[in-house]
């Protein structure tokens, strides 16, 4: 019988436990998501490509992509495969309740360490309010998760919501965590009399010390179908210090592919413009997108490699496909494409 605790102890003694979670292993930057400094030794042997835009060691995966696979196989087998592919980061969408083996929270934290995976953040599951936010914070602390996020936002501006985010973000900051907001399309599709989308007002009217953002690039581009004046890269450039994470996923432009009737998200979140596909196989010009942000970062004196941000690839269309090729096609090909397919502009 495999003794996991003994294996973890051996890794520590051998100096291979670079995935240790907690403050000692991560640099906490106010308003940003802590990230790993380097891949663990021997974890990924392909030579570093200095011409890549995205820092390879900060490529992660949003586990929502593999949610059905986790429910079928459990975190142990999924993490083992992700580590073998070369991942060093994951972002959660739910915790041990997703695992069919009765895994405890402590057991989940142990698996992260065993496979050298650092949690970049977690979308909070269940009700989020003044009564539950401390429980969400404690869950994150138990797992060494440095940032907690709200997965869906209202599509219209509401001051009471802003006030809530500021309160919850302040509580998270007091605990040493980042609180972040994740977009879909609806909050970027309409503008007010001043030409501002609700999402832009969220950025401008939340407390920068308490609230950060995770730009889902796919949903931002999807919003351009209804709001052609929206420029997703410029949105990041204009508010560069507010973005802690990206969701990196791909889609075909409207009309270029038949509608994907298996995916309800376009309708639910006010889109249905782009048709989601595997990362690197769609029409979103990520090379231009990231190069524009990189150029602006350099001009503003920020790190050219985006070290204050994490890059979480995702595919929403893999639910119900436990341990089938679709989720793993995204995980394998998407990671390689991000690490070696996106080039710094000469």
Image (cartoon, helix red, strand yellow):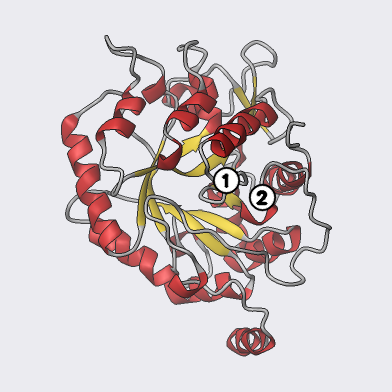
Residue at which label 2 appears: 55
Image coords of residue 17 (percent x, y)? 62, 78
Q: Relative to residue 15, is residue 191 depicted above or below?
A: above
Q: Quadrant of the C terminus?
A: top right
Q: Residues within 10 Å of mark 2 (few under 14, many from 20)?
A: many
Give the quarter of the image for residue 14: bottom right
The residue nearer to you, when weighing 34 against 301, is: 301
Is 115 situated left or right of 131 in this image?
right
Left/right of residue 53 with respect to residue 193 in the rendered view: right
User: Which residue is depicted at the point 41% across and 17% down?
Assistant: 189
Say above or below: 268 vs 98: above
Which mark identifies residue 51?
none
Q: Is residue 264 visible?
A: no
- The answer to whether residue 13 is visible is yes
| Residue 339 horizontal/vertical position (percent) | 73, 47
Q: Are marks 2 and 1 in contact (CB under 8 Å)?
A: yes
> Which label number is shown at residue 306?
1
Q: Earlier in the sequence, mark 2 or mark 1?
A: 2
């Amino acid at each position: 019988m495999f003794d996991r605790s003994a294996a973890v102890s051996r890794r520590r003694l051998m100096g291979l436990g670079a995935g240790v979670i907690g403050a000692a292993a991560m640099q906490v930057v106010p308003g940003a998501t802590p990230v790993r400094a380097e891949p663990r030794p021997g974890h990924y042997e392909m030579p570093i490509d200095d011409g890549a835009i995205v820092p390879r060691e900060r490529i992660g995966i949003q586990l929502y992509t593999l949610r059905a696979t986790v429910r079928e196989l459990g975190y142990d087998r999924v993490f083992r495969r992700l580590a073998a592919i070369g991942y060093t980061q994951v972002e959660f969408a739910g915790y041990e309740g997703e695992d069919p083996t009765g895994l405890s929270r402590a057991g989940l934290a142990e698996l992260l360490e065993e496979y050298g995976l650092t949690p970049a953040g977690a979308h909070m599951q269940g009700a989020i309010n003044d009564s539950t936010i401390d429980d969400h914070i404690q869950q994150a602390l138990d797992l060494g998760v440095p940032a907690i996020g709200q997965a869906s936002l209202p599509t219209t501006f509401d001051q009471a919501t802003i006030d809530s985010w500021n309160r919850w973000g302040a509580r998270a900051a007091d605990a040493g965590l980042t609180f972040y907001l994740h977009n879909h399309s609806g909050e970027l599709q309409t503008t007010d009399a001043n030409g501002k989308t609700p999402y832009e007002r969220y950025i401008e009217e939340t407390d920068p010390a308490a609230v950060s953002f995770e730009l889902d690039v796919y949903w931002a581009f999807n919003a351009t179908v209804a709001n052609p004046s929206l420029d997703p890269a410029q949105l990041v450039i204009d508010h560069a210090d507010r973005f802690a994470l990206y969701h990196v996923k791909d889609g075909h432009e409207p009309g270029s592919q038949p509608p994907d009737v298996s995916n309800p998200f376009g309708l639910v979140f006010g889109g249905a413009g782009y048709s989601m596909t595997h990362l690197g196989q769609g029409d979103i010009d990520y090379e231009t997108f990231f190069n524009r942000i990189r150029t602006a970062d350099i001009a503003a004196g920020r790190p050219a490699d985006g070290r204050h941000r994490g890059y979480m690839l995702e595919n929403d269309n893999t639910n119900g496909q436990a341990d089938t090729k679709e989720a793993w096609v995204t995980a394998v090909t998407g990671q390689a494409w991000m690490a070696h397919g996106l080039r710094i502009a000469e």
